[in-house]
């Protein structure tokens, strides 16, 4: 890609009754954002017009039949549906889920075909998206099926990066789900992502223990001593800079995380509670390990403020910037790894 060529950034609108449309439109209400990418929203002209009017958002957009017709310097809307769905702000309706999935499927199709370069997904409701055609607990699982590679849920905010060994599974199943094989797989994905997507040459990774105080030498569970510790040691002996397991309760409060490029948490809330507390709404959910770049804001549908014009677009804007940066980092990484002479030249001149 040429330096001045605009990245085509696809957007799935999420639940039409939530704040997805609002944060996406507010992000590009700032016309300077159009200098960084060409936004392509998968929805319909009428749905976006209604949201724009209801929320008093001052934008103009360009309606297109398909993503390939998008025009640089404009907000482009791909008309995925012709009918006019009823918008019920703040309500978890069946229609809200159906149109969220229509938007997502159209955007992912365009991503796979190369019509868009990256994808930013607005929040969905994990209950009303369920149907005979869509039986996934969330975006990550669906994308893992549709795209190539092995996925890792990776939350990022500046230098704070937290990945998950397990994501959307019940807490009671966590210990049994964590095996040496899973740890090796997730560490490998994280290490490669840190190199390829974030430009870190020798990443240092910290792993959090499963049990309180990492099991306290078997007093509060044996998984940390029997599964995590030996696997971490094996990986370290083979050259991967992974350390732990660390007791999760004091890890972030003591600023220990600042000594590492990323942290691998054992389960969803163990990683996301400190992440969201520290990132103050500027966090981004990035699906690492796949052949295409996808990010999303770190919040949900926020039904309680939907339709009121109160939603803060900061996290969505960060998701846009992260997607663009990761995409450019990947291009540079591929160029360097595929061209040894260029790599040597840069190394010599640095």
Image (cartoon, helix red, strand yellow):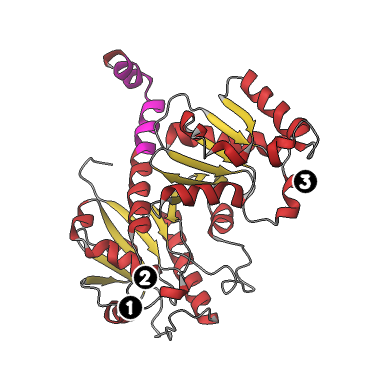
Position of 33 compared to 209: left or right? left
Answer whether labels 3 and 1 touch (C-beta < 8 Å). no
**Quarter of the rendering containing residue 238:** top right
Residue denoted by label 2 = 21
Query: Which residue is most to the top?
Result: 348
Position of 149 compared to 211: left or right? left
> Does the rendering let one see residue 97?
yes
Q: Is residue 193 above or below residue 127?
A: above
How many neighbours does mark 2 have within 10 angstroms: few (below 14), some (14-19), or many (20 or more)?
many
Magenta-highlighted residues: 329-347
The CA span between labels 2 and 3 is 39 Å
How many neighbours does mark 1 have within 10 angstroms: few (below 14), some (14-19), or many (20 or more)?
some
Q: Is residue 325 above or below residue 246?
A: below
User: 280 or 242: which is nearer to us?
Assistant: 280
Answer whether labels 2 and 3 touch (C-beta < 8 Å). no
> Does the rendering let one see residue 210?
no
Q: Is residue 142 above or below residue 243?
A: below
Q: Earlier in the sequence, mark 1 or mark 2?
A: 2
Place of residue 71 in the rendered image (x, y in percent of width and height, measured from the top left) = 22, 62
**Quadrant (top left/top right/bottom left/bottom right) for the C terminus:** top left
Place of residue 103 in the rendered image (x, y in percent of width and height, measured from the top left) = 44, 69
Q: SS at mark 1? A: helix
Residue denoted by label 1 = 51
Answer whether labels 1 and 2 touch (C-beta < 8 Å). yes
Residue denoted by label 3 = 176
Q: Earlier in the sequence, mark 3 or mark 1?
A: 1
Position of 26 compared to 257: left or right? left
């Amino acid at each position: 890609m040429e330096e001045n060529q605009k990245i085509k950034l696809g957007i799935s609108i999420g639940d039409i009754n939530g704040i997805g449309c609002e944060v996406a439109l507010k992000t590009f209400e700032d016309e300077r954002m159009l200098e960084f990418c060409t936004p392509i929203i998968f929805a319909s002209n009428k749905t976006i017009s209604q949201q724009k009017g209801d929320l008093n958002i001052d934008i103009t957009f360009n309606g297109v039949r398909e993503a390939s017709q998008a025009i640089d310097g404009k907000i482009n809307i791909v008309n995925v549906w012709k009918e006019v769905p009823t918008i019920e702000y703040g309500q978890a309706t069946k229609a809200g889920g159906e149109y969220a999935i229509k938007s997502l499927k159209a955007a992912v199709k365009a991503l796979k075909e190369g019509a868009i370069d990256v994808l930013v997904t607005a929040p969905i409701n994990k209950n009303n998206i369920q149907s005979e055609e869509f039986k996934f607990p969330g975006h990550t699982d669906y994308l893992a099926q549709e795209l190539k590679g092995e996925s890792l849920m990776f939350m990022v905010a500046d230098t704070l990066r937290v990945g998950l060994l397990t994501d959307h599974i019940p807490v009671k199943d966590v210990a049994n789900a964590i095996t040496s094989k899973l740890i090796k797989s997730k560490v490998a994905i994280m290490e490669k992502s840190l190199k390829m997507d974030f430009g870190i040459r020798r990443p240092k990774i910290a792993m959090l223990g499963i049990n309180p105080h990492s099991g306290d030498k078997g007093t509060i569970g044996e998984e940390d001593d029997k599964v995590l510790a030996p696997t971490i040691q094996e990986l370290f002996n083979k050259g991967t800079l992974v350390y732990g397991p660390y007791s999760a309760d004091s890890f972030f409060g003591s600023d220990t995380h600042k000594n590492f490029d990323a942290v691998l948490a054992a389960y969803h809330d163990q990683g996301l509670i400190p992440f969201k507390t520290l990132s103050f709404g500027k966090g981004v959910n990035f699906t690492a390990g796949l052949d295409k770049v996808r990010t999303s804001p770190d919040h949900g549908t926020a039904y309680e403020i939907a339709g009121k014009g109160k939603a803060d677009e900061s996290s969505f804007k960060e998701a846009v910037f992260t997607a663009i940066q990761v995409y450019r980092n990947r291009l540079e990484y591929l160029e360097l790894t595929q061209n040894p002479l260029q790599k040597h030249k840069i190394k010599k001149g640095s």
